[in-house]
Image: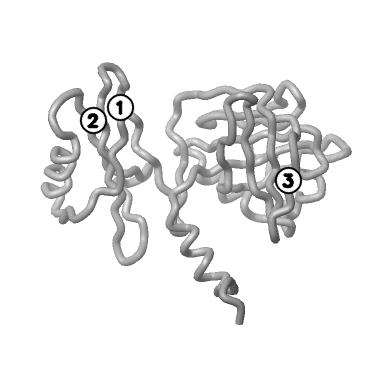
Amino acid sequence: MKADVFDPRALREAFGAFPTAVTVITASDPAGRPVGFTANSFTSVSLDPPLLLVCVAKTARDYPAMTAAEHFAINILSEAQKDVSIKFARPAEDRFAAVDWARGPNGCPIFAQVAAWFECSMHDVIEAGDHVMMVGRVTAFESSGLNGLGYARGGYFTPGANPSAAGGEIAAVAVLERHGALFPLGDDNLSLPDYGAAGGDPAKTLASQLERLGLSVHDWFSLLDL
Protein backbone atom coordinates (compact mmCIF):
# COMPACT_ATOMS: atom_id res chain seq x y z
CA MET A 1 0.00 0.00 0.00
CA LYS A 2 1.25 3.46 -0.84
CA ALA A 3 2.18 5.67 2.09
CA ASP A 4 -0.26 8.37 0.93
CA VAL A 5 -3.31 6.08 0.62
CA PHE A 6 -5.66 6.78 3.54
CA ASP A 7 -9.10 5.77 4.66
CA PRO A 8 -11.30 8.44 2.99
CA ARG A 9 -13.71 8.68 5.91
CA ALA A 10 -10.92 9.12 8.45
CA LEU A 11 -9.27 11.76 6.27
CA ARG A 12 -12.58 13.60 5.84
CA GLU A 13 -13.10 13.62 9.60
CA ALA A 14 -9.60 14.97 10.14
CA PHE A 15 -10.16 17.75 7.59
CA GLY A 16 -13.42 18.49 9.42
CA ALA A 17 -11.52 19.47 12.57
CA PHE A 18 -10.79 22.82 10.90
CA PRO A 19 -13.73 25.22 11.48
CA THR A 20 -14.85 26.93 8.27
CA ALA A 21 -17.47 29.32 7.00
CA VAL A 22 -20.48 27.92 5.14
CA THR A 23 -21.17 29.26 1.66
CA VAL A 24 -23.46 28.64 -1.28
CA ILE A 25 -21.76 28.95 -4.67
CA THR A 26 -24.09 30.17 -7.41
CA ALA A 27 -23.99 30.80 -11.14
CA SER A 28 -26.25 30.57 -14.20
CA ASP A 29 -26.33 27.62 -16.58
CA PRO A 30 -26.19 28.11 -20.37
CA ALA A 31 -29.98 28.59 -20.44
CA GLY A 32 -29.79 31.31 -17.79
CA ARG A 33 -31.23 29.16 -14.99
CA PRO A 34 -29.76 29.59 -11.50
CA VAL A 35 -27.55 26.78 -10.19
CA GLY A 36 -25.85 26.44 -6.84
CA PHE A 37 -24.69 24.22 -4.00
CA THR A 38 -23.33 24.41 -0.46
CA ALA A 39 -19.55 24.45 -0.01
CA ASN A 40 -17.16 25.20 2.85
CA SER A 41 -13.87 24.87 0.93
CA PHE A 42 -13.62 28.62 0.35
CA THR A 43 -10.72 31.00 0.98
CA SER A 44 -9.49 34.44 0.06
CA VAL A 45 -6.36 34.44 -2.11
CA SER A 46 -5.24 37.97 -2.96
CA LEU A 47 -6.17 41.61 -2.40
CA ASP A 48 -4.35 42.93 -5.46
CA PRO A 49 -5.72 41.65 -7.72
CA PRO A 50 -8.80 40.68 -5.68
CA LEU A 51 -8.91 36.88 -5.93
CA LEU A 52 -10.67 34.08 -4.05
CA LEU A 53 -11.05 30.37 -4.63
CA VAL A 54 -13.45 27.57 -3.90
CA CYS A 55 -13.01 23.83 -4.43
CA VAL A 56 -15.73 21.98 -6.34
CA ALA A 57 -16.12 18.20 -6.45
CA LYS A 58 -16.17 16.73 -9.93
CA THR A 59 -19.16 14.66 -8.83
CA ALA A 60 -21.21 17.75 -7.93
CA ARG A 61 -24.57 17.91 -9.67
CA ASP A 62 -23.92 21.35 -11.19
CA TYR A 63 -20.20 20.82 -11.84
CA PRO A 64 -20.38 21.19 -15.66
CA ALA A 65 -22.45 24.38 -15.56
CA MET A 66 -20.44 25.88 -12.70
CA THR A 67 -16.99 25.33 -14.19
CA ALA A 68 -18.12 26.56 -17.63
CA ALA A 69 -19.67 29.78 -16.27
CA GLU A 70 -18.02 33.12 -17.03
CA HIS A 71 -19.11 34.43 -13.63
CA PHE A 72 -19.97 32.88 -10.27
CA ALA A 73 -20.86 34.13 -6.80
CA ILE A 74 -20.03 33.16 -3.24
CA ASN A 75 -22.81 33.68 -0.69
CA ILE A 76 -21.38 33.49 2.84
CA LEU A 77 -24.34 32.35 4.90
CA SER A 78 -25.33 34.13 8.10
CA GLU A 79 -26.05 32.45 11.43
CA ALA A 80 -29.80 32.32 10.68
CA GLN A 81 -29.37 30.45 7.37
CA LYS A 82 -28.65 26.90 8.46
CA ASP A 83 -31.78 25.81 6.56
CA VAL A 84 -30.37 27.35 3.38
CA SER A 85 -27.14 25.41 3.81
CA ILE A 86 -29.03 22.14 4.28
CA LYS A 87 -31.33 22.81 1.33
CA PHE A 88 -28.47 23.50 -1.09
CA ALA A 89 -26.47 20.52 0.17
CA ARG A 90 -29.23 18.14 -0.95
CA PRO A 91 -30.47 17.33 -4.45
CA ALA A 92 -33.75 19.09 -5.26
CA GLU A 93 -35.46 20.28 -8.41
CA ASP A 94 -35.88 23.93 -7.44
CA ARG A 95 -33.87 24.91 -4.39
CA PHE A 96 -34.04 28.59 -5.34
CA ALA A 97 -37.83 28.72 -4.97
CA ALA A 98 -37.52 28.75 -1.17
CA VAL A 99 -34.76 31.40 -1.03
CA ASP A 100 -34.96 35.19 -1.27
CA TRP A 101 -32.46 36.08 -3.99
CA ALA A 102 -31.76 38.53 -6.81
CA ARG A 103 -29.35 38.79 -9.73
CA GLY A 104 -25.99 40.42 -9.09
CA PRO A 105 -24.35 42.92 -11.48
CA ASN A 106 -23.16 40.04 -13.70
CA GLY A 107 -26.30 37.95 -13.33
CA CYS A 108 -25.26 35.54 -10.57
CA PRO A 109 -27.82 34.67 -7.86
CA ILE A 110 -27.17 36.72 -4.71
CA PHE A 111 -29.00 35.70 -1.53
CA ALA A 112 -30.63 38.12 0.90
CA GLN A 113 -29.52 38.29 4.54
CA VAL A 114 -26.10 36.71 3.99
CA ALA A 115 -23.06 37.74 6.02
CA ALA A 116 -21.32 38.76 2.79
CA TRP A 117 -21.38 38.02 -0.94
CA PHE A 118 -18.82 38.17 -3.73
CA GLU A 119 -19.51 38.10 -7.45
CA CYS A 120 -16.53 37.02 -9.54
CA SER A 121 -15.35 36.56 -13.08
CA MET A 122 -13.78 33.17 -13.68
CA HIS A 123 -10.02 33.69 -13.38
CA ASP A 124 -8.84 30.07 -13.56
CA VAL A 125 -10.00 26.48 -13.12
CA ILE A 126 -7.24 24.28 -11.71
CA GLU A 127 -7.33 20.47 -11.62
CA ALA A 128 -6.84 19.09 -8.11
CA GLY A 129 -7.51 15.36 -7.76
CA ASP A 130 -11.24 14.63 -7.42
CA HIS A 131 -11.96 18.38 -7.19
CA VAL A 132 -11.13 21.50 -9.17
CA MET A 133 -10.15 24.85 -7.70
CA MET A 134 -12.21 27.67 -9.17
CA VAL A 135 -10.28 30.92 -8.80
CA GLY A 136 -12.46 34.00 -9.13
CA ARG A 137 -11.59 37.64 -9.59
CA VAL A 138 -13.95 39.73 -7.44
CA THR A 139 -15.98 42.18 -9.51
CA ALA A 140 -18.52 43.17 -6.84
CA PHE A 141 -19.08 42.42 -3.16
CA GLU A 142 -20.99 43.48 -0.07
CA SER A 143 -20.67 42.75 3.65
CA SER A 144 -23.76 43.03 5.85
CA GLY A 145 -22.08 42.83 9.26
CA LEU A 146 -24.16 39.76 10.19
CA ASN A 147 -22.43 36.87 11.94
CA GLY A 148 -21.45 34.06 9.62
CA LEU A 149 -22.49 30.42 9.91
CA GLY A 150 -19.65 28.06 10.86
CA TYR A 151 -19.11 24.33 10.33
CA ALA A 152 -16.74 21.89 12.05
CA ARG A 153 -16.70 18.15 12.82
CA GLY A 154 -20.00 17.62 11.04
CA GLY A 155 -21.95 20.29 12.95
CA TYR A 156 -22.96 23.94 12.57
CA PHE A 157 -21.97 26.73 14.95
CA THR A 158 -21.98 30.53 15.06
CA PRO A 159 -18.68 32.27 15.78
CA GLY A 160 -19.19 35.00 18.40
CA ALA A 161 -19.37 38.54 17.08
CA ASN A 162 -16.02 40.30 17.14
CA PRO A 163 -15.82 43.01 19.77
CA SER A 164 -15.06 46.58 18.67
CA ALA A 165 -11.53 47.08 17.45
CA ALA A 166 -11.40 50.58 18.97
CA GLY A 167 -8.40 51.10 21.19
CA GLY A 168 -6.56 47.98 20.02
CA GLU A 169 -8.92 45.67 21.88
CA ILE A 170 -7.89 42.07 22.53
CA ALA A 171 -10.33 39.17 22.11
CA ALA A 172 -9.99 35.69 23.57
CA VAL A 173 -11.99 32.91 21.95
CA ALA A 174 -12.44 29.39 23.36
CA VAL A 175 -12.95 26.37 21.11
CA LEU A 176 -14.48 23.64 23.23
CA GLU A 177 -14.49 19.95 22.40
CA ARG A 178 -16.46 17.15 24.06
CA HIS A 179 -16.25 13.48 23.06
CA GLY A 180 -14.54 14.41 19.79
CA ALA A 181 -17.20 16.97 18.76
CA LEU A 182 -17.24 20.75 18.78
CA PHE A 183 -19.14 22.06 21.82
CA PRO A 184 -20.59 25.55 21.20
CA LEU A 185 -22.85 27.33 23.70
CA GLY A 186 -26.42 28.58 23.29
CA ASP A 187 -29.89 27.33 22.50
CA ASP A 188 -30.98 28.32 18.97
CA ASN A 189 -27.97 30.23 17.64
CA LEU A 190 -24.87 28.44 18.86
CA SER A 191 -21.62 30.32 19.27
CA LEU A 192 -18.10 29.96 20.59
CA PRO A 193 -17.54 31.70 23.95
CA ASP A 194 -15.47 34.86 23.64
CA TYR A 195 -14.47 37.90 25.67
CA GLY A 196 -12.86 41.20 24.72
CA ALA A 197 -11.44 43.97 26.88
CA ALA A 198 -9.38 47.10 26.32
CA GLY A 199 -7.26 46.33 29.37
CA GLY A 200 -6.28 43.40 31.55
CA ASP A 201 -6.00 39.80 30.42
CA PRO A 202 -9.11 38.71 28.44
CA ALA A 203 -7.88 35.09 28.37
CA LYS A 204 -7.94 34.91 32.17
CA THR A 205 -11.35 36.58 32.26
CA LEU A 206 -12.70 34.11 29.71
CA ALA A 207 -11.26 31.23 31.74
CA SER A 208 -13.05 32.53 34.83
CA GLN A 209 -16.33 32.75 32.92
CA LEU A 210 -15.99 29.19 31.66
CA GLU A 211 -15.15 27.91 35.14
CA ARG A 212 -18.30 29.59 36.47
CA LEU A 213 -20.18 27.50 33.89
CA GLY A 214 -18.57 24.38 35.37
CA LEU A 215 -16.14 23.93 32.47
CA SER A 216 -12.52 22.96 33.12
CA VAL A 217 -9.97 24.99 31.16
CA HIS A 218 -6.83 23.21 29.93
CA ASP A 219 -5.48 24.79 26.73
CA TRP A 220 -6.10 27.92 24.69
CA PHE A 221 -6.74 27.57 20.98
CA SER A 222 -6.03 31.17 19.94
CA LEU A 223 -5.65 34.79 20.97
CA LEU A 224 -6.60 37.28 18.30
CA ASP A 225 -5.16 40.80 18.30
CA LEU A 226 -7.89 42.93 16.77
Quadrant position of the C terminus in the picture: top left
Marks 3/1: CA–CA distance: 39 Å
Asked if labels 2 and 1 touch by Cβ distance under 8 angstroms, the answer is yes
Q: Disc 3 vs disc 1: which is toward the camera? A: 1
- Mark 1 crowdedness (10 Å alpha carbons): few <14, some 14-19, many ≥20: some
Residue 206 picture quarter:
top left
The residue wearing badge 1 is 163
Quadrant position of the N terminus in the picture: bottom right
Instruction: Look at 25% across and 29% down and name the residue there.
Output: 170
The three-letter amino acid code for the residue at tag 2 is Gly
Residue 91 picture quarter:
bottom right
Front position in the image: 98 or 201: 201
Front position in the image: 25 or 121: 121
- Mark 2 crowdedness (10 Å alpha carbons): few <14, some 14-19, many ≥20: many
Q: Disc 2 vs disc 3: which is toward the camera? A: 2
The residue wearing badge 3 is 94
Q: Secondary structure at mark 1?
A: loop
- Lateral position of residue 107 relative to residue 185, left or right: right
The three-letter amino acid code for the residue at tag 3 is Asp
The residue wearing badge 2 is 196
Instruction: Look at 66% across and 27% down and name the residue there.
Output: 138
